[in-house]
Structures are given as structure tokens and as C-alpha cells.
Image (cartoon, rainbow, N blue to C red):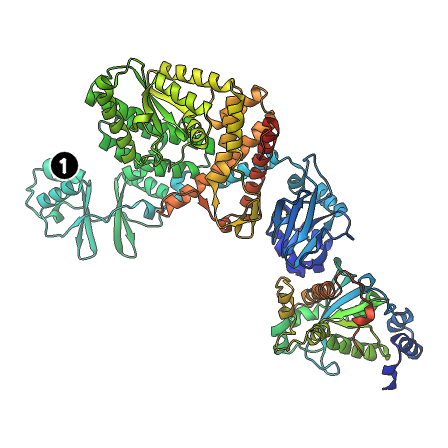
Amino acid sequence: MLERLLPMEMRRKRRLARCAAGPLHDYLATPFVDPARECREVEYIALDLETTGLDPQKDQIISFGYLLVRGVRIELGSARHRVIRQACAIPAESAVIHGITDDQAAEGHDLEEVLTELLQALTGRVLIAHHAMIELGFIGAACQRLYGGELLLPAVDTLGQARAAMLRANLPIRGGELRLAALRDRYNLPRYPAHNALSDALAAAELFAAQIEERAGKHKLPLKALLMKQ
Amino acid sequence: MEVELLEIRDFLAARPPFDVLPENLLNELVGQLAIRYLRRGSVFPPADEGPALYVVRSGAIELRNEAGDLIDKIGEGGLCPHTCIDAGEQEPKRVGHSVEDTLLYLLPCAQLERLQQRSEAFDHHFNDSIRLRLQSALRRMQEGHMGQNRLMRIELGSLINRAPIHVGPEATIRQAAQRMTEERVSSLLVMQERKLLGLITDRDLRSRVLAAGLDPSLPVTEIMTTRLHKATRNTPALEALLDMSRLGIHHLPVVDRQEVCGIITTSDLIRQESANAIYLLSDIRRAESPEELVELAQRIPELHMQLVAAGTTAHHLGEVISSVSDALSVRLLQLAEAKFGPAPVPYCWLAVGSQARREQCNMNDQDNALLLDDSYAEAAHGAYFTQLAEFVCSGLDACGLVFCPGGIMAKTPEWRQPLSVWQGHFSRWVKAPEPKAMMLFNNFIDARPLYGQTSLYDQLHHTVVKMVGENRIFLAHLTAHVLKYRPPLGFFRQFVLIHDGEHDNHLDIKKSGLIPIIDLARIHALAGSLPEVNSRDRLLAAADARIISHDAAEELCDALELISTLRARHHAELHKQGRPSDNYLDPDRLSSHERGHLKEAFKAVRLMQDALAARVGTLR
């Protein structure tokens, strides 16, 4: 518990020391971005996961979608979409939402292979996700299972950013207002079909760019003003 | 490829110029895009980006020139003029701003060039001159409309124009024959309630009754044909025609869900094929009364529609429709002379305006004038020409060439005058070029002698051309007058974008598209004292006379053709829906291609207007 009071960089070093060799170790070996840096000069990975449920301990990751954001410039060439091969059948109720069937999942990638790829992409970068707790929870649990180590990932939560902005402006927050689609509407962003991991990752990336342009405008804004507490 | 999952791909695939890219290049393109978000009021393009092609995904960008005038406003799906390759077209320096929160897709120039190298069709969009782009647009529009034989596309249902005439089985042969005579039909159905029992035709009456000496008081059922070949509303007309000729029959009942809805005759079908201009013109020349002409004129809208459907060029369409108006006018004049006797003094009937230019469409009102020999004396000859003009103008009106609301007609006394008075009219307009005078001048300078003594017109035209050619000040006034009408900048969402950034819900394709080109052509013809009247002829002649460049002339001709084609199609569409003709296009119903082409055409016109303004030195 006390560890939460330490700076991220120090926590990274502690976890690195406790981590066995492997992809997680490699990831943790690279220093985090300096939180004092101007946020538009940082590189980010916008990520979305589709899962069989909300509990990282019990539920499975079905697919990954992510792409690179350099400052506020989203680069589609970096886009990745990975469906994970499942050990057991996908529950019907979640298949209805993400549209991935057992057959597709059976042809998917190994979780370990995808996680290695993702950790490489995240090295020296910052995570962007909408309601990032879910992504952090599932990726953390997977690392724990596969590598026996603890993940630490600097992250910007676009949902948290929106909530904070509304609180700053003294606006009441109504139900559903913090949903990705509702927030995008406010910034005149187009409507994308929801619940595909990649298009949700892109949706979060665009929302992030819009939030930064709104909040920082022509002024400088350090990364630490955006990072979520974890 | 991950990007296939992104909706961006479908967004681009539906829009020019990306719609010409094959699947693999399209996927590649999406993989090379970057996305930027601009808050309202941000500078466009973003200062930290290198040269790139921008596509607006949501929001809007305004471009202005250095003087702050709006050049363009680009909404969803629009392309922002890129800074990569500027193929010779001198684009003014522009300053851009996002006027709404805007999401942009940007393709770096290096990647754009790679795509251009790999897709010729895509490359055309960026490298062709306005002219080549307009031409390929026209070609595509015409090919798109060129189907096979019209009869193959038309269905019987659309040819039925009256309910079937029928009698009950109790009717006698005589009663049936009387009914056919009353209704002026060549066949008659015999029906009980709604059930079709049989059919009799003129030929049955001849061969089965008269030739066989049958008693006409026998019931009609005695002679009717009961084993009938039938067709449905959806049967293609060509198939029906082939069936009928194979079976040797001339009448075909058309049945829709067990119910008879009409009868098609071979002549109905053949009329479809022959409702072309040549038949119509020769029928007009043979017509014996104004009433007969009125009936023939009802075929004009159909002729217009057929020509449009067949992919006829707008230039040719204008010529055909104008020839029909010419033929109607000439025939009415001949009928008038037959009725009122030969003219007491020589005269020349003039077609004026679009008919004179051979650019009529199917909704023009009539514009004409009467030019009389100077031996004309009001007291002695006035009554004759009043009658003649009244007869012809009313005849044209009844034929659908309605009276000109502005009174530009031979039946208006002012426009029914001897040569010297006409010379006086023109001289007055040229000396005092106030707006009304210039409007009248523009009207009457587009004239063409149709009937009578053509030399009268040659004399008038000669003096006017001389008068104008020597009077640069008048030409400058006329130029300033016509340059007031600027084509719009383009389209923004469902609106037409006008210069000051105002929006219009509708595009008046005549006022903002055709008139500026027609005016330019006229000015150039006058400047060179050229005799041509048709706008296209005028432009090409002006190029030959080195008044404008050949490229400029051809570009304007293409713009004229494109805009006229869109208008002709609009008219044909309205006719098909049974609605009255108008010139208002709804920007929302234009395809993105059509919007793009129109924008190019407008741009060509504006460039020529600017060049003319610079040359004549008029202030706008």
C-alpha cells in the first residue's frame, strides 16, 4: 500500500528488480517518460480490450485493438487488431456485444504473443484508454499469470479526464454523459460503430486529442497533469 | 490488414477521388493516414505538419485569400487543396481556419505521390487540368445514361395511358362498332364484370362481319377472339413488340393481378421508337392547323426525355429542341399567311434569346420579334402585321412556348417595327447604357432570322455590330453589367456556397451557371464583331479570332455542356415525375461527383470572368 506514495519511476525500478527475465522485464527496463514533459511531445498507445466480462481475475481478453499517438497526431499505420485464441467458449452475452464468434476466436493469436507485442509497443510510451482501469486490470492480471511479475504502466484515462474537466467547470455529471460516444459527440467527432477493439481504441485516441486541444490550447501542459493516479 | 476494420476506409471509398482506388490501394492509403483534431478557430493547416492532402472528416474549414475574401468552405468529405503538387494552376495564397471543431485525415505528400504513380485514375484527379476533368466527367455522365435500345428498358405499364374500353357480352356487334367509333379506338375488350372474355378489333369487324355478311345485331361474343395472348405491366416493351410480330397480332391486353389495365397496340410501340425529332419535324411541316401543331407539340417533353435518356449532348439537345420551335414558328407563319393573305411589305420573323442561340430546353417561353421593311406604313399595314403576330405568338403559346412575361414578342408593338426604328432602338441602348437598356440589348442582340426576307436582318445586324465595335465604352458597361453575376464557389453540406459566405438552399442552375457563360460568349463575340449566335460557336470563333485562348474557349464550352447536361437531366426527371419544369437543383440530391464537377465548371467561369474584368479594366 505504501508503494503508491512513491514516484512512478521509483516504483518501476522496484518492480523491475523483482521481475524475472522476459517481455515484462524488458518493458520495465526502459525508464518512463518524464512527467514534466510537454504532453504534446509524448508518445502514447491508445488501447481498447474486448473481454468476456469485467473481472480481470475471472474473465478473459477476447481481442486487443491499439494504435500509436504521437503527441496529438494519430497514426493509422501503427494500428493493430488481435483476436485471442480462447481455451473455452465465449459466453453468448459478450459475443453479442463484440461480435467475435468462437470460430474466429479459435483462429486467433496466443495471448502471450500479443502481450509481448503490446509491451514492446508500450515501452517508453504512455497508455491512453477510456475507463483505463479495465485495460490496466486485465493487462496486469495477464502479466501476473504469464510472467509472474507486476506491471506498472503510466496511463491517461479519457473518462477520468472528462470527469475532472466537468468538475473543474462545476458542471453536474448526468448518467451516460461520460460514455465514449456521448463525449465524442460533444467534440463534434464522428460516430463510429462501437465494440470493435480497434475502432474503440481509435475513438479514445481522437477523444484524447480533442481533450488536449481543448484544455491546453496554445499553452503548455505537462504530462503529469494528465496521468491517472495508480 | 488491421485498417480494414476501420470505418474510415468505407468513408473514403464512397468519395472521390478515393472511389477510383482499387481495394488493395485503398487499404494501403488508410494505413498511411494520420488524424488531427482542430478546435474551432484554429489555423489550418496545422503549423507543425508538413505538406499533406487533407480530408475533412467532421467539422468545417474556411479558406480565404490574402484580402480576406472567402474562397472556399469545406465540409464533411471535402478535400482541402493540398500543397503537394500544384500542376500549373495558379492558386492564390490562402489562409485557412477551422470554423467548427474539426477532425481531419491527412495523407503526407510522399504517400500521395506513391498512390498517384500506382493508380492512373486517381492520378487524373490531381494532375488533369480543369478542362480534362470536365471532359471525363461529361463522358462518364453520357455513358452512364446510354443504355441499350429504349424499348428494352421501357415497360408496358408506362405506355398505358387510358383505361381499356370495353362492352359486356350482351352488346351487339353494331353497338361494339359504335362504341369503337365514339372512343376512336381500334380494339375493344369484351368483359363480364371484371373478367376478360375476349377482344374484337377493326380487322375482326371487316373480315368476320362485313366480308362474311354477318348480321351486326348478333352478340359481339360471336366474333370476338377468346384465346388471347396477354402481357403484364412489367413486360419489357421490346419483348411485347417481338411477341406481337411473331403472333401476327396488333393488340395486346395488359393484365395486372388478374385485372385488365389496358391495351397496347403495335402503333403505341412504334410511336415510342419514332417519337424522334425527324418524325416530329416532318409532322409539323405537314400540319394543317394550329390545333394540329398543338397536338404535335405535346410530344416535345417526351422527345426531350428520350434524348436525355439516350445520352445526347446538351449542345445537340439544344439544337433539336430549337429546331422544333423553329419549325413550329415557321409553320404558324405559313398558316397565318394562308389565312390573312400575303404580306403587304417584306418582313423578317426573328427568333430571339435561347431559341436564336439554339440553346432551348423544354421549358422556354417564347422570345421573338418582327422586323419590317422600311416601306411599312402603320396606317396601311399595321392591322395585317398585328394579326399575323397575334396569330403566331398565340399559336406558340398554345404549343407550350408560353408568352414571354417580359413581352419580348412580335405581338408587342414596340418589337414589331421597321428596320429604321430597330436601328434607332439599338442606337439608343448603346448610347445610354443604363441597366434596362443593357438588358434589352442583350435580349435582342441574340437574334436569328427564321422566316421572310433575311436580308432585312443582315442589314440590322451589320449596323449594330458596327455601332458596338466602335464603342469601347459601351462594351465596358456591358461587361460590368454581366460580371455582376458570379457563379457560386461550390457547395457546403446541403447548401450552395456564395461569395460572402452566405448559403442558398437551392442552386438556380440557369442564373448562376448558364447565364454567366452565355454572357461571356456574347461579350467576346461583340468585341470581335463576330456573327455567331450560339454560345459555343461564339466562344470557338472568339478563340479563332484570338480574342480569348483556345484553352479558355474549350474550357468554357465544356463547362457550358456540363451545366446544360445537368439541367437537361433535371428537366427530364421532373417531367418523368409529372412535375412542372424549373431550374432549381437541390444540392442535397447532387452526387458528390456532380458537386465536384459543377464546382470545377463554376471555377472555370470565374477565372474567365476575372480575366475579362482585368482586360476591360472594369471594377467589380
Residue B100 image point, x, y percent: 63, 57
Residue A190 versus residue A10 in the image, above or below: above
Residue count near mark 1 (Cα–Cα under 10 Å), binned few <14, some 14–19, many ≥20: few
Residue B99 image point, x, y percent: 64, 55
**Would residue B192 appear left or right of B611 to someone viewing this image?**
left
Visible in this render: residue B146? Answer: no
- Residue reaching furthest right? A17
Residue at position x 26%, y 34% from top? B294
**Would residue A33 appear left or right of B451 to someone viewing this image?**
right
Residue B68 versus residue B562 in the image, above or below: below
Q: Point out the image quarter for the N terminus of chain B.
A: bottom right
Numbered disc 1: secondary structure? helix
Residue at position x 61%, y 54% from top? B76
Residue type of the residue flagged with mark 1: Arg
Visible in this render: residue B479? Answer: yes
**Would residue B571 appear left or right of A58 to someone viewing this image?**
left
Q: Please state which of residues A98 and B97 is positioned toward the viewer in this rendering.
A: B97
Residue B8 versus residue A229 in the image, above or below: above
Residue under label 1: B206
- Residue reaching furthest front? B432
Residue B396 image point, x, y percent: 29, 32
